[in-house]
């Protein structure tokens, strides 16, 4: 059969509304064939003038809301997907999300997954006007309300599906609702799914008319005794397959033909079988799918019936592999008929209602479980490629005839703006919905630049490099494909940008970034300290209360920061403080912050209290009040003495005082005010060794003016007996206390012998 050249049409005009999202397909009241598992695929084809972050198809029934994430191709101006849903009647809303909120949405009020049937045969399938046909009561029973009166080889200019009403036709060639509206009510009520009918029947046709017209052999017209238009009646069946079933799928062809073959025809065994078997096989060959057929047993015409016709119909069902099922036996339904042949609903009979019931009983009697429905994919993805003038949109290699939304039919479209859609046919001329695309939001030219906080980067730092705006795709000369990234070394950068289809739309100027090396003074900062002692181990500075510490950073810094506050190169301190320094060099490169300086101010010691210990010795009376690291500095007549002991023997007479000093590691220290002064005198006639006090109640002290060696000190009583004795190899002359508490009152002799001196002294203990 020659390829039929359809005039292609569109579901919606391509002039997209200002809303970013538009749904081109499905149209309102579309019904997609379900599988035997009660699931089918709702095909969605639409455009978006703006890139969305995500895309969701929401299906709302009377009892549920189901959200399905769609593949998000909005960056390319379109979305196209089949969504699996259970049988049901839904409100479909496609929602585009941006930044977590709905940016745009579009709704189809009614769309479903259910049962789709193609009706075929002659007038008791096609229907007749004014025979009492009733429309559907259930809102879910639908058809395309169109009658191809002019026998156009093209489908209607717009696909508009509506509820079957009392005055509805059923495209492409059905007259009136006939019994199909009522049958739809029964199916919808029993299975709770929507129903969609198409009607390709032709009145008064013979079985041979269908096989002849398939091969474009002029078919005999019993009504005119002429011929039917070339290709008819088969073309309506072919159109129902290639157009309607290709879009929505189909459960089966409901076949009702045999009246004309019986009367006025003269049936011969096997003829009906041959013609209809050929028609079935060729229709499947032309469509490419093994569509089930339900063949009614029908022969009654103007009072005549034919077992020959009925047997051929039964033989078709029995034929192995023909995928044919027994339909209703309609000869006995509604007798007598309205006009001797046709069913009708009258005041006395509900013949069309009975016919609908007969069909329903066959469909409901196991057929739905035994048949394999056809679930088609109506979507065809177009080939969209870049060229110098924008995008070139064309069909893929396995697609054939198509027509653009502007009604042109050239091989391809090339543009940088606008909205486009194409109707595409596969190799069998089955109708497919080509990708609808809105490229108004797609860029084709850009002048991008590189942005950063600086044109240079500091050693040890990273610098964020970014493109001036977001693009669908970006490629940097270093191979990076991100819009932003960090660098930490010298670099010369540039990038190219591409739109969502991979078209190069611009490139940035190159930009050079230089890494600034750390100068020596910033690697390990040094400081000048005006006062105090710096301990490099503990990072501490110690000085005395009342002093002023000035710390100055060395080096060619551009900025000085002390404890996080920008200041001068020098910081002045007068109390305990923890100090950290950081600076900036070469304009804005920050150094790392130093470890903390602990600056401590130490209080001055209290002044010592000095006393005359003995005729030869001065002593710090409050020495025990000082810490062990305090040094006592004795001062008297010139020159200043450096002796630091708390007990001191002056070598010459003079005015003596003392200062307590807490020294630091570098020799600096905090000194006390001077102590009280003592006028120390030396009697030239004074003995070298003295004993005091005399008399005494309990003890005596013995002191020498200079160091003695091999010393023995003995205390003798009145009868010459030694009662106390002390031996020393070296005696520095400091006072030695001799305890006399245990001795009786009286006179005693103390004898001191050394290698230098011999002394005898009488004392009295009272």
Image (cartoon, helix red, strand yellow):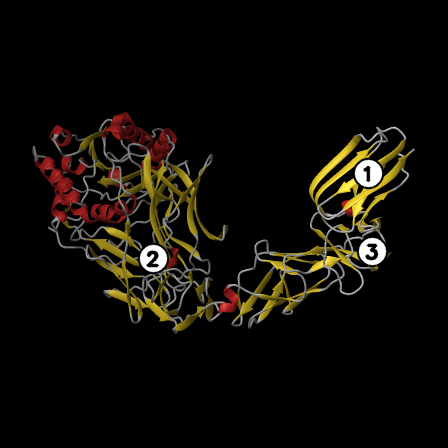
Q: Quadrant of the C terminus?
A: top right
Marks 1 and 2, the one that precedes in the sequence: 2
Closer to viewer: mark 3 or mark 2: 3
- 693 on left or right of 53: right
Residue that numbered label 3 is attached to = 675
**Numbered mark located on residue 436 in the image:** 2
| Label located before the other in sequence (3 or 2) | 2
In the picture, measured across the screen, residue 491 lies left or right of residue 633, that is left
Camera-side residue of 560 and 193: 560
Mark nearest the camera among 3 and 1 is 1
Label 1 close to label 2 by CB (< 8 Å): no
Q: Nearer the viewer, residue 196 or 678?
A: 678
Calculate the distance from the C-alpha at mark 3 to the C-alpha at mark 1.
Answer: 36 Å
- What residue sits 84% from the left and 41% below the top? 761
Q: Which residue is mark 1?
A: 750
Residue 462, position in %: x, y? Answer: 45, 62
**Residue 312 placement (x, y as % from top left):** 12, 31
Please say if 427 is above or below 461. Answer: above
Dot 3 and dot 1 residues touching (CB under 8 Å): no
- The reply to whether residue 131 is in sight is no
Sort mark 1 into few (<14), some (14-19) or many (20+) by Cα contacts within 10 Å.
many
The residue drawn where x is 38% and y is 30% is 189
Q: Are marks 3 and 2 in contact (CB under 8 Å)?
A: no
């Amino acid at each position: 059969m020659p390829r039929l050249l359809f005039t292609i049409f569109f579901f919606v005009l391509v002039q997209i509304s200002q809303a970013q999202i538009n749904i081109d397909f499905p149209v309102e009241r579309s019904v997609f064939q379900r599988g035997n598992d009660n699931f089918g695929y709702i095909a969605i084809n639409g455009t978006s003038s703006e890139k969305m972050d995500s895309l969701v198809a929401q299906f709302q029934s009377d009892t549920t809301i189901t959200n399905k994430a769609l593949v998000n191709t909005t960056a390319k101006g379109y979305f196209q997907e089949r969504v699996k849903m259970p049988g049901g009647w839904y409100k479909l809303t496609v929602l585009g999300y941006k930044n977590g909120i709905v940016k745009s949405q579009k709704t189809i009020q009614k769309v479903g997954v259910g049962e789709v049937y193609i009706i075929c045969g002659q007038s008791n399938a096609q229907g007749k006007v004014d025979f009492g046909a009733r429309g559907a009561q259930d809102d879910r029973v639908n058809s395309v309300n169109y009658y191809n009166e002019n026998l156009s080889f093209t489908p209607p200019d717009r696909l508009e599906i509506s509820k079957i009403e009392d005055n509805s036709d059923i495209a492409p060639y059905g007259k009136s609702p006939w019994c199909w509206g009522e049958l739809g009510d029964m199916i919808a009520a029993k299975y709770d799914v929507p129903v969609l009918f198409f009607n390709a029947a032709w009145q008064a046709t013979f079985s041979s008319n269908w096989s002849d017209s398939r091969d474009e052999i002029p078919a005999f017209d019993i009504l005119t005794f002429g011929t039917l238009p070339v290709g008819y009646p088969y073309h309506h069946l072919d159109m129902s397959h290639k157009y309607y079933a290709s879009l929505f799928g189909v459960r089966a062809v409901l076949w009702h033909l045999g009246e004309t073959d019986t009367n006025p025809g003269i049936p011969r065994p096997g003829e009906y079988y041959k013609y209809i078997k050929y028609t079935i096989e060729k229709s499947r060959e032309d469509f490419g799918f093994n569509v089930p057929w339900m063949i009614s047993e029908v022969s009654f015409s103007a009072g005549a019936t034919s077992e020959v016709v009925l047997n051929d119909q039964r033989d078709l069902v029995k034929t192995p592999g023909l995928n044919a099922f027994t339909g209703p036996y309609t000869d006995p339904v509604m007798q007598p008929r309205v006009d001797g042949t046709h069913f009708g609903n009258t005041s006395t009979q509900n013949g069309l209602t009975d016919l609908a019931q007969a069909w329903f009983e066959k469909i409901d009697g196991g057929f739905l479980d035994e048949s394999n429905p056809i679930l088609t994919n109506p979507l065809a993805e177009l080939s969209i490629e870049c060229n110098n003038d924008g995008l070139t949109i064309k069909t893929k290699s396995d697609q054939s005839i198509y027509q653009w939304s502007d009604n042109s039919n050239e091989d391809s479209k090339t543009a940088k703006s606008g909205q486009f859609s194409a109707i595409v046919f596969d190799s069998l001329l089955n109708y497919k919905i080509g990708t609808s695309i809105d490229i108004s939001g797609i860029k084709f030219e850009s002048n991008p630049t590189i942005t950063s906080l600086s044109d240079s980067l500091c050693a040890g730092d990273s610098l964020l490099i970014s493109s001036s705006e977001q693009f669908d795709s970006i490629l940097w000369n270093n191979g990076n494909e991100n819009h932003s990234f960090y660098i930490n070394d010298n670099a010369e950068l540039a990038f190219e940008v591409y739109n969502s289809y991979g078209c190069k739309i611009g490139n940035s100027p190159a930009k050079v970034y230089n890494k600034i090396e750390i100068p020596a003074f910033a690697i390990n900062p040094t400081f000048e300290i005006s006062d105090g002692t710096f301990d490099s181990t503990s990072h501490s500075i110690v000085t005395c209360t009342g002093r002023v510490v000035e710390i100055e950073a060395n080096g060619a810094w551009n900025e000085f920061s002390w404890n996080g506050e920008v200041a001068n190169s020098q910081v002045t301190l007068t109390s305990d403080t923890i100090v950290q320094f950081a600076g900036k060099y070469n304009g804005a490169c920050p150094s790392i912050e130093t470890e903390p300086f602990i600056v401590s101010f130490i209080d001055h010691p209290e002044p010592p209290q000095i006393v005359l210990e003995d005729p030869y010795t001065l002593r710090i009376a409050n020495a025990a009040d000082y810490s062990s690291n305090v040094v006592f500095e004795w001062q008297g007549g010139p020159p200043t003495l450096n002796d630091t002991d708390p007990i001191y023997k002056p070598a010459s007479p003079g005015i003596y005082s003392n200062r307590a000093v807490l020294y630091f590691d570098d020799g600096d220290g905090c000194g006390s005010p001077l102590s009280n002064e003592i006028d120390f005198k030396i009697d030239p006639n004074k003995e070298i060794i003295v004993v005091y006090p005399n008399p005494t109640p309990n003890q005596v002290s013995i002191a020498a003016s200079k160091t003695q060696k091999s010393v023995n000190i003995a205390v003798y009583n009145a009868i010459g007996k030694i009662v106390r004795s002390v031996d020393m190899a070296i005696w520095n002359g400091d006072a030695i206390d001799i305890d006399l508490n245990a001795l009786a009152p009286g006179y005693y002799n103390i004898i001191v012998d050394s290698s230098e001196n011999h002394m005898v002294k009488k004392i009295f203990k009272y």
